[in-house]
Amino acid sequence: MFNVKDHGAAGDGKTNDAKSIDAAIAACTAAGGGIVHFPAGQYLSGTIHVMSNITIDISPGATILIGDDDDIDTIEDLGYDPHADDETSYFNCALFRLDDIENVCIQGGGTINGNRPKRHGPKPISVKRCTRVTIRDIKIEHSPNYAISCIDSDLIVIENCWIEYSFADGIDFDGCRFVRVSNCLVNSGDDAICLKSSPALGEGVDCAHITVTNCHVMTSANCFKLGTESGPGGFTDITISNCTFDKQPISRNPPGGICIESVDGAIIDRIACSNITMNNACCPIFLRLGKRGRAQAVLTPGILQNVSISNIVATNAEMPCIISGVPGYNVKNVLINNVMIAYGPAAKQHLETTIEYTGVPEAEDKYPDPRMFGDLPAWAFYCRHAENVHIRNMQSRIDPKLAKLKPAIAQDDVKGSSFDVTG
């Protein structure tokens, strides 16, 4: 074990301890690997360069504060257009920087503090092209960027982490494989748990074999989302189960609960969502196959198919569940089973405006969001450009006066499907 204080770290919350921490990591690496230990104290630090075969042990009572921007590594010079947001594209600008290494753990029961009053700044933990990374038993608070951000990495485990008041996304995986997230609490201003397959690395990298379970989510954006930054990479073999969703305290309601979206050519296949309760999510279930075509020379929709959603309980919803492809490109093979949704008073605003059924805009090239179509011609479920969609045992409840304003279900260009929705 290598104690950072033995290598000069002050731990007083004022001194920049980055060089001392890197010295402890270097000594640990020279010894063949081991544990770099942070005893109780406050450590102000710029970028910390983690090496292979290292465990970063942040003990209870230890807090690591992200230092000034001048002490943080500058962003990468990619030399190409990543066709993705800055926070998605850049990984050097971080507190803990894991870059092309393996066999690393960050743990210990301590805290990482973003030390910023708002969004935009370093990532607390960035993981780029790494293998066998475990992050567990830590708290990350006031993150100005994605709190835990991973790209093109394998064998990632995130467990028992507490992300508190992140100003951006909570946990992001971009083109990662063999990932397990469990027993975490995520409180974020933007998407809580988000999967991507962006071209940020200049090539398409798939997200595959990912499980999320036993997590509590609070957000003012989407609770669980995949697909807004994607293409040509895809998403396969993704599961989320045994989770609770709600809004951030003193914030707006999340637009979406379960959001599965392909708008940039991504192939989404074999997705299972089960045993989820959500409160205040405006649209509990949103499946969208679109035609935005970011980074595509020729705009071509991808594929969204083989999705199972079961055992969902949602309260205080506002909008109908939505499944929507685009003309000529259908969402395929969807099973939604055992769902209970109770609509709250805010649903009234979506029902008072009556529109013609054919008047719903396609919005093919728009950013995917449950609110993108405006008012819809149903209050419980809206489905179009889809095939082999089967809804079983779905109970939707709303004020009887509101239920009379529009039908429960509306369909358009839907093939080989069946709906069992009761009010």
Image: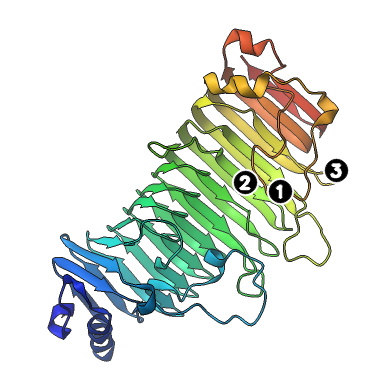
Q: Are marks 1 and 2 in contact (CB under 8 Å)?
A: yes
Q: Please name the residue that numbered disc 2 is placed on.
A: 260
Characterize the local packing of mark 3: few (<14), some (14-19) or many (20 or more) Cα atoms within 10 angstroms. Answer: few
Which residue sits furthest bottom? 30
Q: Are marks 3 and 2 in contact (CB under 8 Å)?
A: no
Residue 6: x percent and y percent? 13, 83
- Sequence-wise, which precedes: disc 3 or disc 2? 2
**Residue drawn at 48 percent across, 51 percent down:** 193
| Residue 372, above or below 359 | below
Q: Indicate the secondary structure of the residue bearing disc 2.
A: strand
Q: CA distance from mark 1 to mark 3?
A: 14 Å
Which tag is nearer the camera, tag 1 or tag 3?
A: 3
Q: Please name the residue that numbered disc 1 is placed on.
A: 304
Towards the viewer: 188 or 154: 188
Residue 188: x percent and y percent? 42, 48
Is residue 1 something one can see in this rendering? no
Q: CA distance from mark 3 to mark 2?
A: 18 Å
| Residue 345, above or below 256 | above
Labels in figure, total: 3
**Residue drawn at 76 percent across, 36 percent down:** 388
| Residue 164, above or below 178 | above
Characterize the local packing of mark 2: few (<14), some (14-19) or many (20 or more) Cα atoms within 10 angstroms. Answer: many
- Sequence-wise, which precedes: disc 1 or disc 3? 1
Towards the viewer: 400 or 307: 400
Q: Quadrant of residue 377?
A: top right
Q: Please name the residue that numbered disc 3 is placed on.
A: 327
| Residue 295, above or below 417 | below
